[in-house]
Image (tube, rainbow, N blue to C red):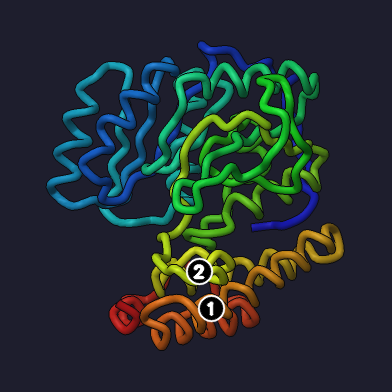
């Protein structure tokens, strides 16, 4: 994939409306509560597009039952192709189905009833054509809002990047930009996409009003006051992707976004310190983290090989 500026032509990006936005959710073995979460999404959108990455039989049957609803479309991949490639599949399909905007969500996102209305109000307040709009969220594990500001539905803050979940994306522009980097597989695909969009003249904002609840990592149960500085307690496999993809993104955009890149390097150092101080499975996570750094330095991208996955489980 070519990074940096992308030369593309497109018609004027239309203003998003309640009829022109499709919700896209990527799944991989979703839990039993996923059905109820999707019904809450469905109440706000004309269509929900689920892209499944090779879930097991039980989850597949649940997804197929959901797809019996005419407002839900299911794309089933036989294997786990990663969140980036699945999101790209969803965006292309949504555009073919006549939608011009998409709202991307994680399978564990808990949407609030006014999510879509709030993001549409932010778009109207911005008055900018080339824009990605992220939704503020309550971090369920840390029990606080991601950003704190006056929670008016029209208010927003400028950001360098926003997370995948709860982001309003113009489909034609996103496809023209090249979509999400599928060689990342998972982690940092949202940050890299936002930085590439910024390099092509897009504005990135986030709503001040929280529009969803989001699980970020796994909560660390500890009573010591200093445990609040702990990182996200991801699995060893996720530690690999976080380390590799964060390093690659910070390196590739360092001269264009130096402040952002330095914060990401600090984030990596903090994450490694969190493994050593607070988290379980320290040996496996440290091994995965260091391997991710080394692979990033030598541009070894793509999904993990099976032998590595078995070693870190």
In this view of the protein, which residue sits in the foreground, 53 or 241? 241
Which part of the image, by quadrant, shows the N terminus? bottom right
> Are there few (<14), some (14-19), or many (20+) residues within 10 Å of tag 1?
many
Q: What element carries label 1?
A: helix
Q: How crowded is mark 2: few (under 14 residues within 10 Å), some or many (20 or more)?
A: many
Which element type, helix, strand or loop, lies under badge 2?
helix
Q: Which residue: 40% across, 20% down?
A: 47
Residue 256 is situated, as x and y percent measured from the top left of the image, at 85, 58
Kindly report the distance in space between the C-alpha atoms of the residues bearing marks 1 and 2.
Answer: 6 Å
Q: Name the residue under label 2.
A: 241
Q: Tell me where residue 20 sits by quadrant.
A: top right
Counting the numbered discs, the total is: 2
Residue shown at 68%/64% (left/top)? Answer: 249
Name the one closer to the observer, 85 or 131. 131
Q: Is residue 38 above or below residue 20?
A: below
Q: Do the residues labelled 1 and 2 touch (CB within 8 Å)?
A: yes
Using residue 53 as the reference point, say whether residue 212 is left or right of it: right
Q: Is residue 302 left or right of residue 188?
A: left
Query: Split into 4 quadrants, where in the image is the C terminus?
Result: bottom left
Please state if 214 lies on the left or on the right of 250 as rendered.
left
What mark, if any, has residue 292 been given in the picture? 1
Q: Where is residue 218 in the image (x, y as percent from the top left)?
A: 41, 60
Which quadrant of the structure image shows residue 75? top left
Closer-to-camera residue (309/266): 266
Q: Which of marks 1 and 2 is nearer the N terminus?
A: 2
Residue under the image location 72 percent in, 57 percent down = 3
Q: Position of residue 236 (x, y in %)?
A: 41, 74
Q: Does 255 appear above or below 175? A: below
Residue 40 lies, in percent from the top left, at 36, 24
């Amino acid at each position: 994939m070519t990074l940096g500026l992308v030369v593309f032509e497109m018609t004027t990006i239309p203003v998003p409306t309640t009829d022109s936005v499709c919700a896209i959710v990527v799944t991989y073995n979703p839990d039993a509560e996923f059905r109820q979460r999707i019904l809450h999404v469905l109440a706000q959108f004309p269509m929900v597009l689920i892209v499944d990455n090779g879930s097991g039989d039980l989850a597949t049957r649940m997804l197929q039952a959901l797809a019996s609803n005419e407002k839900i479309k299911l794309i089933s991949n036989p294997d786990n192709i990663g969140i980036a490639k699945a999101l790209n599949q969803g965006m292309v399909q949504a555009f073919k189905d006549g939608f011009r905007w998409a709202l991307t969500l994680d399978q564990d996102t808990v949407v609030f009833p006014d999510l879509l209305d709030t993001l549409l109000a932010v778009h109207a307040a911005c008055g900018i054509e080339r824009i990605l709009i992220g939704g503020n969220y309550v971090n369920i594990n840390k029990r606080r809002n991601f950003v704190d500001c006056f929670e008016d539905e029209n208010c927003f803050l400028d950001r360098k990047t926003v997370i995948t979940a709860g982001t309003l994306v113009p489909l034609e522009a996103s496809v023209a930009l090249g979509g999400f980097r599928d060689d990342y597989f998972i982690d940092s695909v949202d940050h890299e996409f936002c930085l590439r969009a910024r390099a092509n003249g897009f504005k990135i904002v986030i709503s001040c009003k929280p529009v969803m609840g989001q699980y970020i990592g796994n909560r660390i149960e500890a009573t010591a006051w200093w445990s609040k500085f702990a990182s996200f307690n991801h699995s060893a496999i996720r530690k690999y992707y976080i380390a590799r993809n964060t390093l690659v993104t910070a390196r590739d955009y360092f001269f264009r976004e130096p402040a952002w890149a330095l914060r990401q390097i600090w984030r990596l150092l903090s994450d490694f310190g969190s493994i050593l101080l607070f988290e379980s499975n320290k040996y496996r996570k440290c091994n995965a983290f260091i391997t991710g750094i080394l692979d990033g330095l030598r541009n070894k991208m793509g999904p993990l090989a099976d032998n590595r996955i078995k070693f870190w489980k």
